[in-house]
Every structure is written in C-alpha cells, then in structure tokens.
Image: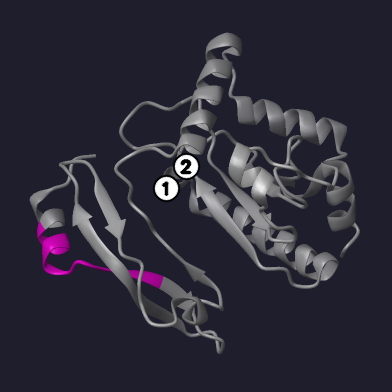
Amino acid sequence: MLLTSDMRAVIETCQLCFAATVSPDGRPNLSPKGTIRVWDDEHLFFLDIASPQTRANLEHSHSQLFALPIVPREVRDELEGARTHYAAKERCLFCDIVRQELGEGRRVVADNSDAVALAPYASRSPFETWILPRRHQSRFEDTPAGEVAAVARLLRDVLRRMDAALEYPPYSFVIHSAPVSEPTDFYHWHIEILPKVTRFGAFEWATGFHRNPTLPETAAKVLREAM
C-alpha cells in the first residue's frame, strides 16, 4: 500500500510514536516511546525507543506498533513455508494444522465455534500457544467482527489458564497477518502467545535454535486442566 500525501503529512507533522498502555486502574493511556520516519513510498520505520524509565513505565499491559522497511526473517520463513505447502497440496497449511490437531486432541488447549487454541507441535518455548480462526482468512483486518470477538474470548480464556497454571507469568503475544502488498490466499492469520517461563541463553543467542524442556502435549494438558 502506497503512502498517500495525507499520510506523509501526518507523519511529518507528528513524528512521535506511542505505546498504547492500560493503567493499573484500567484506564487507557498513550506513552511517547520514540520517533517515526518515512523510509520510502511504502515503508515507515521506528527508531530511538528511549524515554526515562521506559521499562518501569511499561510494567503493566501495553501494546506496541512497529513499521519496518523489511520483512523479518522469521515472518518471511513462515510465509514461504505456507506458500510452499499451498503450492504442493493446494490447501492452506494452517487449515491442515487445525484439522489435524482437532482430530488428535492431544495439543488442543481450548476451543470454541470459531477458533482453536493449541500448543504447536514444534513449540519454541514452554507453554507457547497459538490461537487460529477455524475459518480460513489471510488477514486479521478482513475478519468479520463476530469471529474477532470469538478469538478475543478464547485469548482471554487461554491467558486465564496460564495465570492459574503458571502463577501469573509475564507474556507476549503477537498477531501474524498476511502482508497487504501481495496476494496471500495461502496464508492464515493467527495469534502466538509466548509466556516467559525460561531464559533465552547463550546457546539460543549463538545458534538461533530454540530449546524447549516441556513437551507441547504436556503443556496443553496442564493448561486444559488449569480451569
């Protein structure tokens, strides 16, 4: 999607970027965390995340939006894997995962009529959980409101299970959605939740490999039984 002249004017007028946070009493809040610049006609970039006591300011729930001039390697690899599977099978990789996991049941954490939460077969860390819509949809922004609400309810359910089973761990979750600049019928948007219960050590930093001491089947069972 090309940046319009109006978009560029807004960015050049107000170059501060914000983290959307929720205050401890539940009130929404915006905190300036850096600056945003135009890279070219299609890309923005975010820089200089520097503010006094940034970490302390963000101890409560918050969201951050980054616009990058490149597609990160991990996202690119996921896209290429989905594209290759679609070319070979003429089916969506993630739809196949949902069907297989629902059929086996061992790695399913919870589900409802529109979405399923599961521990991925090759989980990168203990209790990693994905939430996928049952119906194929490439882009989050194109999903009907009712399905988004169902995914949100399942997200809340999974986070409550993690709180109960893991004693309120810190966590991050991200939405993986198809790029807007190319056809991506092969892709399937989803949410990935990563509770932080182990440390990312020297081996991981040096190799880019992940070590997970907890079987996904065990993690899913623990979360199923947590509530």
Kindly identify which residue carries mark 1.
141
- Crowd rating for badge 1 (residues with CA inside 10 Å; few <14, some 14–19, many 20+): few
Q: Residue at x 61, y 12 (%)?
A: 89
Q: Residue at x 78, y 45 (%)?
A: 212
Q: Does residue 134 appear anywhere in the picture?
A: yes
**Which circle marks residue 35 in the picture?**
none
Q: Quadrant of residue 119?
A: top right
Q: Would residue 125 appear left or right of 208 to someone viewing this image?
A: right
* Secondary structure of the residue carrying numbered label 2: loop
Q: Earlier in the sequence, mark 1 or mark 2?
A: 1
Q: Is residue 109 above or below residue 97?
A: below
* Magenta run includes residue 118: no
* Magenta run includes residue 11: yes
Residue at the top extreme of this rendering: 88
Please tell me which residue lies in front, 17 or 148. 17
Q: Residue 74, image x and y in percent?
A: 52, 37
Q: Residue at x 64, y 63 (%)?
A: 171
Q: Amino acid at mark 1?
A: Glu
Gap in angstroms between the C-alphas marked 1 and 2: 8 Å
Please tell me which residue lies in front, 140 or 181. 181
Q: Residue 26, image x and y in percent?
A: 54, 84
Q: Amino acid at mark 2?
A: Ser
Kindly identify which residue carries mark 2.
177
Q: Does residue 114 appear anywhere in the picture?
A: no
Q: Is residue 7 above or below residue 63?
A: above
Query: Disc 1 vs disc 2: which is toward the camera?
Result: 2
Please tell me which residue lies in front, 128 or 139. 128
Q: Residue 3, image x and y in percent?
A: 17, 46
Q: Which residues are magenta?
A: 9-19
Verify CB contact (< 8 Å) between mark 1 and mark 2: yes
